[in-house]
Image: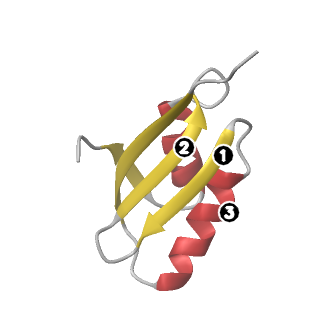
Amino acid sequence: MTTKTTHTLLRAEGFSCPSCVNKIEKRVGRLEGVDDVKVHFATARIEVDHDESQASVDDIVAAVAKAGYKATPSAF
């Protein structure tokens, strides 16, 4: 069985410090099906490689919210 990895880009709001990056990466990284999380502090972007059947975009947005930040899907 092969898993299809989806690459999702999110725009984040509300981070003000580099330690926020670690908080988001930890929270999202704990989700089942997430392979990789990269938070770009300077551009307020979150890149996530995940198996959509296990971790949907909504799940990722919810995980970012639990970390205390707002994220929305982005086309770029």
Identify the image quadrant of residue 15.
bottom left
Q: Is residue 64 above or below residue 57?
A: below
Look at mark 2 in the image and give the residue it sits on: 49
Q: Residue furthest left?
A: 76
Q: CA distance from mark 3 to mark 1?
A: 12 Å
Q: Earlier in the sequence, mark 3 or mark 1?
A: 3
Q: Which residue is mark 1?
A: 35
Q: CA distance from mark 1 to mark 2?
A: 5 Å
- Nearest the viewer among 5 and 24 is 5
Q: Amino acid at mark 3?
A: Lys
Q: Earlier in the sequence, mark 1 or mark 2?
A: 1
Secondary-structure class at tag 1 = strand
Q: CA distance from mark 3 to mark 2?
A: 14 Å
User: Regarding mark 2 in the picture, which secondary structure is present there?
Assistant: strand
Q: Is there a contact, CB below 8 Å, between mark 1 and mark 2?
A: yes
| Residue 37 against residue 9 in the figure, above or below | below
Q: Amino acid at mark 2?
A: Asp
Q: Nearer the viewer, mark 3 or mark 2?
A: 2
Q: Are marks 3 and 1 in contact (CB under 8 Å)?
A: no
Q: Is residue 72 left or right of residue 19?
A: left
- Residue at numbered disc 3: 26
For badge 1, the amino acid type reads Asp
